[in-house]
Each structure stands twice: as structure tokens, then as C-alpha cells.
Amino acid sequence: MRERIAAGAACGLVRIMGQYESEQWRAIDITVHSDKEYKNPFADVDVFGVFAGPDGRTIRQLAFWDGDGNWVLRFAPTAVGAWKYSIESTDPENGDFSGEGTVECVPYAGELAMYRHGFLKVSEDKTYLEHADRTPFFWLGDTHWTFVTEERFDASSCPKYESEFKACVDKRVAQKFTVYQSNFRDGKVSGYFGKNLDMMHENEDGTFTPNLALFQTNVDPKMKYLADSGLYHAVGYAWGYDMETNGVDRYKAFAKYTAARYGAYPVCWTLAGELPGYSGDLEKNVKLWGEVAEECDRWNVYGNLQSVHLACDRPFPKIYENEPWFDFAMSQAGHGDFDLSQTMYEEFREMYAGHPIVESEGLYEMANSGELSSRPITPAMMRRLAYLIMQSGGCGYTYGVLGVWEWQKEAGVGGIGWGDMAWYDGLLLPGADQLTIFRDFYEEMDWSTLKPLSEDKAETKSFFMSNVSNRAKIFFTGNADMTTVVGYMTETSMREFVLRGLTAEKYEAFFMDPETGERTFVEGGVSPEGGEFHYKPEQFFGTKKDQLVVLRAK
């Protein structure tokens, strides 16, 4: 057996007689070479590295075929110490697929949270996502559905940037985003939205072979750059309707290959977009994509989280919630005049009880709303949805912006008719900066401890209405002992409210503008009477501005 460090490994390494060094959670590449010729190396043989860790964990990592007789083991050690590995395969007569070595894992020395705290899992109370060391993970995503098909890694249509792809990633990292949401868009084109690329070649015998040139030159540098930037990559294989055109065998093969090639990166598999879809045999579509998810789970040795990007039906689709591979739920609120209310999310939370929820698509900034009004979506509209999901028990929000989510190379070039703006102009729109404020605010409030408050603890009142409508309510969350309470007032909210069950004698209180982060403190704070605080402003008809109200025990 000949072992070589693959070019572009995530860490700089030196091979010493089968010995490697890596930082914890950081992927390294170990290349295994064989001169034996296979008709279809991808389909004819599976090569594995069996890694035994110092903590007793064993990871049986599938290698990915990378051409020229090379299979690559991409391995990310999950514990500090010595990992012993051995090579094995489904072709035991091939002596090239044998041997052993060690990987010495040292503590991660950088500042990226994904590697300081480890890959993601579901929290014990099933309401949010957390790192391996149980540090809560705040999901703040940016949407790039055409990251493979359109965004260029080594070129740019804007002279300000050398790389379109890097410009987007770097900007969102600086704005404290944590998730890059995308789709491989594999397969033959089967819908009006965007384009697809054949990432898997179909052979005459019905098997598939990875399009190595496309993976190596297009996808690999982008996946690695995301990993090295510390962004969690939530990625689907194709759009839901692509199943009918391309078939389940193709996507099973694709799921297996991408699990081997990219599973050692911080990645979340989101299956397919717009499931179950809006036409055709939806039940069959869900069944076949479920088989693909099961195939992913078979090779998902790091336990990377799995979910599905849902369609924007009302009520939300209820699929896969009882499947063992399904970890958290991704709602899609849509982009316009649907009733975007707390009731919507309350119903969704009931549908997916026992699963954390994130908002995965809604109100892309400056896109034309897609239903009745067809007005450009403002930052205020987007903000309302972001705060609404968090105040309704969710654990994150995914942003999207005109020019980027569907990629317009220049104004008037690209896109699908939801507006007209070049990607480099969309990248600089103000909504993303307001989401930096959004994340900073919730992390200061220890957001993972906040849960929606019932009507008996937080009541929105009106002097002229017996029942306050959902759009007029103030959405409140609080921690278990009611020492922190957060309320979000939309521009239509009534501003009179009563809080009950407060446990502290005195609270710091302030209002915050979510657009600017500016805070207005209540002089002297708040002293509840009998655990109750009643706020009654002079004007009952609300304002033209959304705002937050916070009470924190002194």
C-alpha cells in the first residue's frame, strides 16, 4: 500500500511512516492507491478506513474514489489523542487495500466555534442545536441555491472582488452568520428554477460514476473554503421535482459519494428542496427521497444532522417526522402575503414535536413578494419573520437576498424574474447587518433558555378590543425562573401588556430598535407587584416601527 497526503488537505501535514497529525474536528486526507483496474471503481469496490479513537469510539469511514487509482479517506478526529487506523475493502484480494497507521490528534488552536466546540447535534430537550461539547449553536444562514451552478470560485463579474464565492462567504462570516444554505443541483434539468449540472454520469449498465472534473475543480474548493471559514453547510442534493426526471438510484449513489467526500466537514444534509412539492405524485416523491435519506444515513458516520427543505404549503407539510434519520425541522414561510403569524409556527411546532425548528426560507430581501401584493420585500418585513421564529420557540433563521439566492451576474443577467439586482449589490443590502444585531441580541439574552410564554404569563391587552388578533400580539419568551423576559412587538402590535409570574424584586428594562440596536432604558427599572408588571403606554395604536422589550433581573 502507498499512502499519500492529498493536495489541499485542511491542515498542513507531514507524513512519517504512516503517521499523521491533525487538530480535533479538522479534516485530513489520507490517499490509498491501487494499480488494479476496475470497470467502474466507484461501483465495483468500497474502501474503508477503520479509525479507533482514544475515547473508545470507532469510525468506519468510507473512502471516495478520486481518479488515477486513488481512493481518499477524509477523516476528522473527534477526540484528542492517538487514533489507530487500518485499511480494508470489499475486495480482500487486492493487497493495496490493506495496512495501518496512526493519526495523532491535538487540540484545535484556532478561534472558529465549529472546531473549538465540535460538530452539531440536537440538544437534550430537543428544542435547539448544539455543538458536541453542548455549547448552543445559533443558526443564522444565508441562501445560495446556485453555489455550484453559478457562483465562481476563481472569477468575478465585479472588479471589487477576485472571487464571487469567496466574497459572499467572507462578507457573511464578518456579519456573524453561521450557516451557508445551498443545493448541489445534481441531475438533468427538470424545472423552471435555475439550472442543474450532471455531477453523476449514468452508465449503460445502470450504474453511476462521479463527474470527477466537476467535483475536483468546482465543488471541492468551495466545500473546503466553507469548512475553513467555520461555516456550517446545510446542503441538499437536488430539487424535489428532480426525482421524477433523474430517478432514485442516481440520488442514492450521489448521497453515498458526497457522504464519503464531504462528511468529515461541518455539514448538514437537507435532502431536497421544496418537498413534498406542489404537483405530481407527491406521496411517491416523498417515499423515494426518504430512501435517499436512508442511504445517506447508512454512510453518515459522523452523525451529521439530516433534515429536509420543505415546501411552503399551508399547513406546512408533515413528512419524515418519525423517521430515525430526521433530526430537526426546516419550515418555509414563503415570500409574500401568506399569514406569517405565531399561530403558523405554533402549529408547526406541534407537527414536529420533539424536533428543533428553524426557518429555512422566507421573505428574501428586495425580492418581489410572490403572492398578492408583489411589493419588494423590505428589511422590516424580513426582520419580523426572523424575530417571530425565535419568539415562537425556534432556534434559527435563514436569510436570502435578491441577486444572491438565485444569482444574477449583473443587473438584468440571471435570476428567475423575482427582481433585478446584481449579486454584488444584493450582498450589501442592510438586512444582513440587522441580522448581526439579531444574533448578538439573542446570544446576550442566553437564547437557548428562552421559551414561549403562555397567555396567563404574558398577555397583550387593548382598551377597545376584547380579543387581540395574532398580528397585534406581542410575542414573549422567558427563561424558566422568569428572570429574563423578551418581547417582540411588530409594527402592528398593541403596546399594552401584562407580565405575570415574575420572580425578581427588580428588573432592568429597556426597549430596543432591531434595525439599529439602539436601546432606550426605563429609568429606575421595573419593580413588579405581586410578581406582576403592567405596561400601559399613552398611545394604544402602536407605532410604525417594530421593537423589542426586555426585562432582566438585577
Image (tube, rainbow, N blue to C red):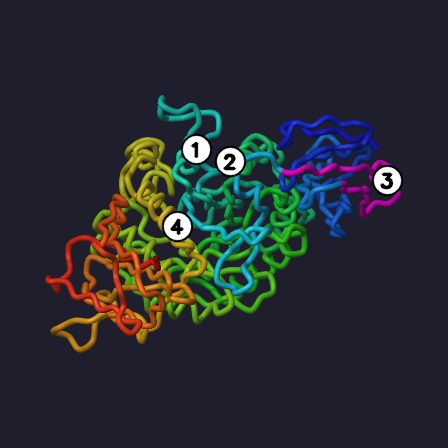
Q: CA distance from mark 3 to mark 1?
A: 45 Å
CB atoms of marks 3 and 1 within 8 Å? no
Considering the numbered disc 3 on the image, is that residue within a helix, a strand or a loop? loop
Find residue 97 and report its horizontal and vertical position in percent.
82, 39
Report the Cα–Cα distance between label 4 and label 3.
57 Å
**Relative to the observer, which residue lies in front, 395 or 68?**
395
Q: CA distance from mark 2 to mark 4?
A: 23 Å
Which residue ends up furthest to the bottom in the rendered image?
A: 466
Q: 225 above or below 238?
A: above
Point out the stretch of residues depicted in magenta.
Answer: 82-107
Tag nearer the camera, 4 or 3: 4
Mark 2 element type: helix
Determine which of the numbered discs, if any, sits on residue 444 in the image: 4
For label 2, count other residues whose C-alpha is less than 10 Å away and answer few (under 14), some (14-19) or many (20+). some
Q: Give the image location of residue 409, x and y in percent.
A: 36, 32
Residue 296 x, y percent position in the rendering = 62, 54
Q: Which residue is mark 1?
A: 170
Q: Earlier in the sequence, mark 2 or mark 1?
A: 1
Category of crowding for the residue at label 3, using alpha-carbon neighbours closer than 10 angstroms: few (below 14), some (14–19), many (at least 20): some
Q: Residue at x 13, y 73 (%)?
A: 463
- Going by the numbered disc 1, the residue's amino acid type is Asp
The type of residue carrying mark 2 is Ser
